[in-house]
Amino acid sequence: MSHIAILSSSIRESRMSHRPALFLERQIASSGAHTVDLIDLEALDLPLFHERLRYMKDPVPALVSFTERIRKAQGVIIVTPEYNGSFPASLKNVIDVITQDWKRKPVGLCSVSSGSFGGTQVIVSLSFVLWKIRAWVVGGPLQVPMVQDQFQEDGTANDPIAWERRATAFMEELEWAMEASERMKG
């Protein structure tokens, strides 16, 4: 059984992107095909990047724990809102602090917006950063437009049939990449 980490990247008050992260966590757990770890950056309250983890003399325990959780995962889903065409600083912070740990890691992107385009611009900007550090950005992102109308605060989908279908297609792409990655290691 493979292990998937979901990275909920927004740390804002009243954040909406955490809702689809909760939905995906439940979907993955209920499938029984994978174990899942929801990593909530808001809860971790990590320090601002000043050096890569491998060069830090005394990293805070939360950062070490975060890194181990990413390393343990065969695949990562990044759930991110779109802020002015890009992603939150909290996400850039954790990408940069463990750059080497993203190399060849299958990463599925879930973009969230309160508008009708579902974060199309953040997909481009985040993909570029991840490609630069050689993460394996999986095709077929899961885009969530009008997030405030799609999910309840607890992650319950307002149209569960539609979102289960979309999540299944998204997961098929990530699972394919995870399996391919594991085969290449073996």
Image (cartoon, helix red, strand yellow):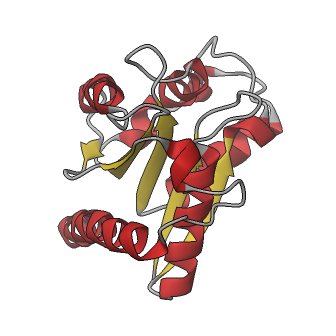
> In the image, is 38 to the left or to the right of 133?
right
Residue at x 58% of width, y 44% of height: 148
Check the picture and name the quadrant holding the N terminus: bottom left
Residue at x 48% of width, y 85% of height: 31
> In the image, is 149 to the left or to the right of 59?
left
Residue 137 against residue 84 in the figure, above or below? below
Q: Position of residue 61 (x, y in %)?
A: 81, 39
Residue 35 against residue 142 in the figure, above or below? below
Q: Position of residue 48 (x, y in %)?
A: 69, 16
Q: Position of residue 84 (x, y in %)?
A: 44, 13
Q: State the residue in front, 127 or 168.
A: 168
Residue at x 41% of width, y 35% of height: 100
Q: Position of residue 124 (x, y in %)?
A: 25, 27
Q: Quadrant of residue 85?
A: top left
- Whether residue 105 is visible here, answered yes or no, is no
Check the picture and name the quadrant holding the C terminus: bottom left
Residue at x 71% of width, y 53% of height: 153
> In the image, is 123 to the left or to the right of 163?
left
Q: State the residue in front, 79 or 41.
A: 79
Name, please, the residue furthest toward the bottom: 32
Q: State the residue in front, 152 or 101.
A: 152
> In the image, is 79 to the left or to the right of 59?
left
Q: How many marks?
A: 0
